[in-house]
Image (spheres, helix red, strand yellow):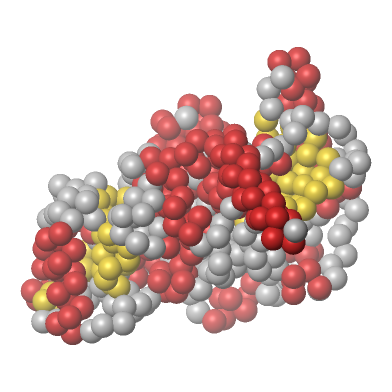
């Protein structure tokens, strides 16, 4: 796509018809959890959108977040939105290397001050002057600060960039910190998940393209349209939870009947993410549908919050009343649930217990 | 997802946690609004927490009506009116036949079927060019 072209011009040049575009917009509306009736308005706005420059910075990470996005099958919604931005700098994807690559980053900062977006994956090591991760002789911290200074906004992709993630896990040997721990004066959107669902990454980008603003966020800076509800709120096994029907091991009758996985350690009740509706692998399913509990990967400290296979420490009844309170009292209720989660998580952290292979075996009686 | 669909899965006829009755009731409310106030509406099927088998049950319950349309634009879109007039089932797929969105629309005619004004204008110009070239050919023949 040429720099000054609108998205509508670009699609038309590629031979995509108006109906094709409308269909793309209907899918975008669905992705952003907007009413499907908004497709027309989205088509108008997206049609006029111009292509923003994006600098993608990869710090202490495993490249899983990039994989999540680029492995989603093409030609998909993701690839179309990706086409609609100008991805000027990305270690893993760019062809050039060394000085030339760094030069491009500097050029974007100079040419489009206060207009470009930064996407970050990975946490930033602060200990020992940041020696644990450097690029072109610069520490991650220096690169982040230099690039952020003139950015319009930062999107922290993945739990590492959003909350520190796995590098941050106890004992945090590199002094890993999240983007929002460091940058305080720029709009930041957190898109946590280990990895995040590809469509959630592109959802934030398409919101920016469509409305020219960042989406509405929760207290942890996560877009409400994807993280507004918990896995448990949208889980198809929820009726079993409400009826008190739980699988007790991975191969008992309850597991075969598709009962709730709460007692097998499901973190769905305290985890805000869109897996239950957006699903994984191009909409095939999500972990609970495959019979495995949610690990809580989109929440801070998920790695240190006790064993993945240990039930949350509050009883289903307690959680139920907090959750129903949340529905009735809106944000206040969910904030209360969040607080009690924090308390629970630090409780489990104090009693930090490692899971062993025999623990897992004991579940499959 | 064509490969996945080749794996035959037996769908239990009855799921104890079925969402189908709730969806049917929602359709009833929306159909009522279409009848009385002429307001079209839709349900985004991706946002519903459905139990395995609910989707098939819902499809079977609504059945097929008289109209079935296929649109070829960035991959196939299948649209059909269900056995209940005014309730349409719309499935958008990409060019690899993967679902990208699926809706039930409660409307007299889904918006995507209507031809846009700009397209009608363009087709007028195209038609003029066709007429011109045919007239030229006929004149040359003489
Ligand atoms: S506890 Fe887990 S499996 Fe059970 S209903 Fe909640 S999210 Fe679903
Ligand atoms: S189901 Fe839970 S652990 Fe799995 S990806 Fe979703 S939020 Fe993360």
Residue B51 position, x and y percent, is 74, 51
Quadrant placement of the C terminus of chain A:
bottom right
The residue depicted at 19 percent of the width and 72 percent of the height is A104
The residue depicted at 66 percent of the width and 40 percent of the height is B115
Residue A276 in view = no
The answer to which image quadrant residue A136 occupies is bottom left
Residue A87 position, x and y percent, is 32, 66
The answer to which image quadrant residue B65 occupies is top right
Residue B10 position, x and y percent, is 88, 65
Between B6 and A48, the residue placed more toward the observer is A48
Residue B90 in view = yes
Q: Residue extending furthest front?
A: B142
Residue A169 is left or right of residue B58, and the answer is left
The residue depicted at 27 percent of the width and 71 percent of the height is A89
User: How many numbered dots are placed on residues in this image?
Assistant: 0
Residue B63 position, x and y percent, is 90, 44
Quadrant placement of the N terminus of chain A:
bottom left
Residue A98 is left or right of residue A309, and the answer is left
The answer to which image quadrant residue A82 occupies is bottom left
Residue B63 is left or right of residue A224, and the answer is right
The residue depicted at 77 percent of the width and 53 percent of the height is B70
Looking at the picture, does residue A306 appear above or below residue A97? above
Q: Residue extending furthest left?
A: A129
Between A135 and B101, the residue placed more toward the observer is B101
Between A248 and A324, the residue placed more toward the observer is A324
Q: Residue extending furthest top?
A: B36
Looking at the picture, does residue A119 appear above or below residue A152? below
Residue A222 is left or right of residue B6, and the answer is left
């Amino acid at each position: 796509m040429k720099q000054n072209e609108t998205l509508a011009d670009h699609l038309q040049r590629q031979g995509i018809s108006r109906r094709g575009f409308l269909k793309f917009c209907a899918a975008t509306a669905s992705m952003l959890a907007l009413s499907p009736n908004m497709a027309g308005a989205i088509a108008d706005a997206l049609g006029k959108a111009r292509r923003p420059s994006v600098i993608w910075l990869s710090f202490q990470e495993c490249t899983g977040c990039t994989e999540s996005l680029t492995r989603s099958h093409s030609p998909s919604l993701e690839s179309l939105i990706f086409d609609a931005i100008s991805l000027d700098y990305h270690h893993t994807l760019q062809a050039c290397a060394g000085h030339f690559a760094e030069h491009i980053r500097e050029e974007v900062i100079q040419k489009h001050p206060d207009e470009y977006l930064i996407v970050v994956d990975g946490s930033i090591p602060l200990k020992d002057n940041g020696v644990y991760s450097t690029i072109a002789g610069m520490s991650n911290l220096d690169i982040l600060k230099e690039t952020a200074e003139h950015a319009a906004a930062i999107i922290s992709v993945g739990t590492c960039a959003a909350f520190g993630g796995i590098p941050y896990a106890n004992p945090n040997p590199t002094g890993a910190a999240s983007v929002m721990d460091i940058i305080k004066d720029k709009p930041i959107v957190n898109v946590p998940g280990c990895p995040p669902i590809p469509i959630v990454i592109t959802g934030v980008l398409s919101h920016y393209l469509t409305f020219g603003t960042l989406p509405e966020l929760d207290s942890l800076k996560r877009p409400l349209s994807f993280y507004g509800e918990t896995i448990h709120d949208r889980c198809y096994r929820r009726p079993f939870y409400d009826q008190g029907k739980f699988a007790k091991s991975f191969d008992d009758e309850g597991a075969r009947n598709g009962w709730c996985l709460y007692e097998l350690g499901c973190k769905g009740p305290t985890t805000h993410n869109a897996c239950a509706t957006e699903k994984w692998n191009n909409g095939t399913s999500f972990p609970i549908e495959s019979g495995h509990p949610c690990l809580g990967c989109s929440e801070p400290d998920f790695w240190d919050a006790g064993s993945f296979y240990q039930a949350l420490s509050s009883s289903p009844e307690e959680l139920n009343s907090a959750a129903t309170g949340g529905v009735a009292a809106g944000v206040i209720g969910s904030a209360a649930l969040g607080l009690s989660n924090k308390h629970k998580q630090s409780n489990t952290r104090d009693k930090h217990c490692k899971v062993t292979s025999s623990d897992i075996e004991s579940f499959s009686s | 997802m064509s490969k996945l669909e080749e794996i035959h899965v037996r769908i239990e006829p009855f799921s104890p946690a079925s969402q189908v009755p709730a969806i049917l009731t929602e359709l009833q409310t929306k159909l009522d609004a279409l009848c009385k106030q002429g307001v079209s509406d839709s349900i985004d099927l991706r946002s519903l927490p459905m139990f395995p088998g609910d989707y098939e049950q819902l499809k079977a319950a609504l059945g097929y009506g008289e109209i079935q349309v296929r649109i070829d634009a960035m991959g196939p879109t299948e649209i059909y009116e269900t056995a209940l007039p005014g309730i349409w089932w719309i499935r958008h797929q990409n060019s690899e036949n993967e679902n990208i969105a699926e809706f039930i629309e409660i409307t007299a005619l889904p918006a995507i079927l209507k031809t846009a004004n700009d397209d009608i204008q363009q087709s007028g110009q195209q038609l003029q060019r066709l007429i011109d070239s045919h007239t030229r050919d006929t004149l040359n023949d003489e």
